[in-house]
Image (cartoon, rainbow, N blue to C red):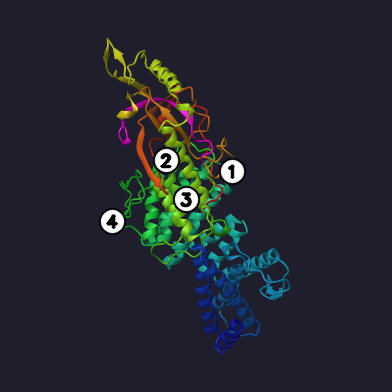
Amino acid sequence: TRGRNDCESAAVVGAMPACDALGVLEARAETLVTQHESASDKAQHALASESKILLKDLLREVQKLENDGLLDHPNASHSERARGLYLRGRLLEAVGGVGGVVVAGEAGEDTASPGGHLKKSHSDDELKTQNLDGAEQLLKKAAKLDPSLDGAWLTLAQLLWKKGDLEGAKNCYDAVLHKKPTNVAVHKKTLCQLSMLSRTLAKSNAKPGTEAQKRFVADSVLFAKAAVKLDLNDGYSWYQVGTAYMSAFFAQGATDKSKLLQALKAYDCAEKGGPLGTLVAINGDGNGNGTNKGTGDTHGFGDQGDTSATGGTKNIHNSALTNRNGDHGIHKSGSPGGGIGDHPDLHFNRAVVSRYVEHFGEALCGFAKAQALDKNLPTQTEVDAVLAALGKLHDACAGVGASFKQKKLAGIKSALREDTGETTENADGRTKTDGKTQNVPVVLTHENRQFSCVELASLTEGVNQNVALRCRAVIDATAGASGTTGGGENNTEGALNLHYVVVDKYGGLCAVSVYGLEDGALRLSATLTLLEPDLRNVDVTYRGKRYEFKLIRVDSPRQILVAGKAPVGRIARPRLATALM
């Protein structure tokens, strides 16, 4: 049936003037390529496969019409000839590996060769190489004949990216971006592609922690925000902003929580198709307080030219950013505007961000949404990691386990009191002076600032300004908490943050999440001082089990002292995730 329809379609097109026939074929190609890319992004595998077959059929039809001399005419302009070359090149690129899947026929089946003609192919790899090489030749000719043909430049950039020529891809995108923006949709898509490509360049073409890498990451943020400015209601552009900020957090030390909060705001706009009611500030202090003074900016962006952060990170969570379809993170379909709540990658990446701002309930919910949309995403691995961390911290903060026997805790509390010059206590742990129970205030001076040392029970939720908590780690709860390592119970390789359970001198137990430090930086035998502790009460119920405990977040090595000193020499190395979009 499909073959009969193809013949009928070819006959109809063949009866048209060449210029009209080309326009009809271009429209069909646009529809099918967009349909395939959208289906791939949404993990609609059946629709993606169907559209891929139709693309292959269209390529055969175009080739037949060309061979019959029905597409060209003697008086064709440079523009018309370029459009014909672009059409063939675009279809060859599409069937050669759209979505990272080679459209391979059976052995000996006719396929399109590098010159755009049909020949025999015997393997998937050979077919893919032929199609991509042929597409590259055609697209380069099209761009040379008509430099204003943006589609040829964008498809060529996409192809070169697949082949690993990142600089070549960037040059093609730049060729589109540097022209006068007559087509907002094209410029928006180009900016989004450059945002993704900048993150790939940061990983592939720059050493960790270098200024070059920081520039690539900063460029990624700037390109994504520029795309949003062109269309505030385009969910895909907002998605790129969120992913750029998440990448900046991971790449620049995992010590700037505000970037994660900015990513969450952008992801919310991506799902709903823009800010709701009022414009969301995606720059500033990370809490919705934009810093737009003097920038002339009306969209809440502010000046984000420098996204670098101090500190580093150990081994970045490798699955933090999904890499859809294996195409080096290439998303091609873009968005005509509106929300992208049906894209599984959005929910997956937002869940990862939620995990690292310790919004564990939202993380588990997000992974469930991603799994419902795409069963091929590694959501179960992520859920297992979150539940492993929650289970360990919940049990430890409840005093469950051999490490929390009273005799052992008594020794730790005694060591803490000695550090503050206290020698006696009553039954509930408070200091006794002349037979009367009282709390003796202790003031700590650090870097010309004074902090009042308090007990865990007196901390309030949120950041406790000008306050310090002295404690000791009872257990290291990091080991085996990451489900992505596959390294067993004692392997912390891959953990982005370190988890400990600490006790204060009165026996209060609390979880501590530490960012920016290498494993081993905090000795269990040393007294820790947490400066201006950021406390939150974790209360999550998942599948009938409740996890409840206090958690202090330490975002930077500057917020913690080990035995009264900064943890020198154990600062984590900056590193990029292995899969970046």
Structural distance between the alpha carbons of marks 4 and 3: 26 Å
**Amino acid at dot 4:** Thr
Structural distance between the alpha carbons of marks 1 and 2: 28 Å
Membership of 225 in magenta stretch: no
Disc 3 on helix, strand or loop? Answer: helix
**Amino acid at dot 2:** Asp
Q: Name the residue beneath numbered marker 2.
A: 256
- Mark 4 or 3, closer to the camera: 4
Instruction: Tell me residue 322's x, y (percent).
Output: 51, 53
**Amino acid at dot 1:** Gly
Disc 2 on helix, strand or loop? Answer: loop
Tell me the residue at 45%/61% (across/down): 343
Q: Residues within 10 Å of mark 3 (few under 14, many from 20)?
A: many
Q: Earlier in the sequence, mark 4 or mark 3?
A: 3
Q: Is residue 397 visible?
A: yes
Q: What are the residue bounds of the magenta stretch? A: 459-481
Q: Is residue 13 left or right of residue 373?
A: right
**Amino acid at dot 3:** Asp
Q: Earlier in the sequence, mark 1 or mark 3?
A: 3
Q: Earlier in the sequence, mark 2 or mark 3?
A: 3
Which mark is on residue 278? 4
Q: Name the residue beneath numbered marker 3.
A: 219
